[in-house]
């Protein structure tokens, strides 16, 4: 939840402040919402994220969700997406990073790079992009696929000023060839 619409540095600061302020997740769940807001403020959208975090903690209760490591992927994803404020990307992050499941989170960088490279059809929804990344990475390490696309999107294939001339993928990239 803290990683939504922010960068890694701000997410990490928000998480560290949350853990410093509250000893347990039960303390976070039961705290006055404004205290949680203040703790996570550096992560951005704290007024929205704090109640969602508390709602998720209430919904999960004492369940550590460890069963998701072995549940069918679609079932685990659906359960996570039923939690307040959890969409496909957040569910994918939990499944990949917490349970080492074969899931590829599609954030803004992955979506942009995938679209420019022609991995996704122009105008593809995030759900469609998630499904396509799962298909494309079926025989690959999903963590590596995710991280490589993010790195490329942050360093080379940026939103406002892509550095196509420096891109090692430019010869195969429809965007760099002016086709998109």
Image (tube, rainbow, N blue to C red):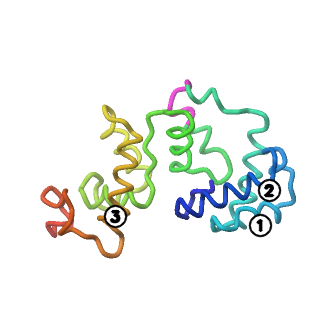
Q: Is residue 107 left or right of residue 9?
A: left
- Circle 2 sits in a helix, a strand or a loop, which is it? helix
- Tag count: 3
Q: Image quadrant of residue 26?
A: top right
Q: Residue at x 86, y 50 (%)?
A: 30
Quadrant the N terminus occupies = bottom right
Q: Which residues are magenta?
A: 70-76
**Residue marked by disc 3:** 155
Counting residues from the start of the chain, the first of labels 2 and 1 encountered is 2
Counting residues from the start of the chain, the first of labels 3 and 1 encountered is 1
Counting residues from the start of the chain, the first of labels 2 and 3 encountered is 2
Q: Residue at x 17, y 69 (%)?
A: 165
Marks 2 and 1, how far apart at CA = 10 Å
| Marker disc for residue 38 | 1
Q: Are marks 2 and 1 in contact (CB under 8 Å)?
A: yes
- Circle 3 sits in a helix, a strand or a loop, which is it? helix
**Residue marked by disc 2:** 21
Q: From this view, report whether residue 78 is shown above or below residue 125.
A: above
């Amino acid at each position: 939840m803290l990683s939504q619409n922010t960068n890694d540095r701000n997410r990490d600061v928000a998480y560290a402040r949350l853990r410093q302020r509250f000893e347990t997740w039960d303390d976070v769940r039961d705290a006055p919402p404004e205290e949680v807001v203040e703790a996570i403020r550096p992560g951005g959208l704290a007024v929205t994220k704090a109640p969602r975090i508390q709602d998720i903690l209430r919904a999960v209760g004492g369940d550590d969700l460890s069963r998701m490591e072995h549940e069918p992927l679609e079932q685990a994803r659906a359960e996570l997406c039923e939690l307040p404020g959890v969409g496909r990307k957040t569910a994918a992050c939990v499944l990949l990073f917490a349970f080492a499941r074969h899931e590829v989170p599609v954030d803004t960088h992955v979506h942009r790079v995938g679209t420019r490279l022609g991995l996704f059809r122009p105008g593809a929804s995030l759900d469609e992009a998630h499904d396509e990344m799962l298909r494309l990475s079926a025989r690959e390490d999903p963590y590596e696929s995710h991280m490589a696309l993010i790195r490329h999107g942050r360093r080379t294939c940026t939103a406002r000023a892509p550095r196509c001339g420096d891109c090692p993928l430019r010869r195969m990239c429809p965007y760099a060839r002016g086709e998109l």
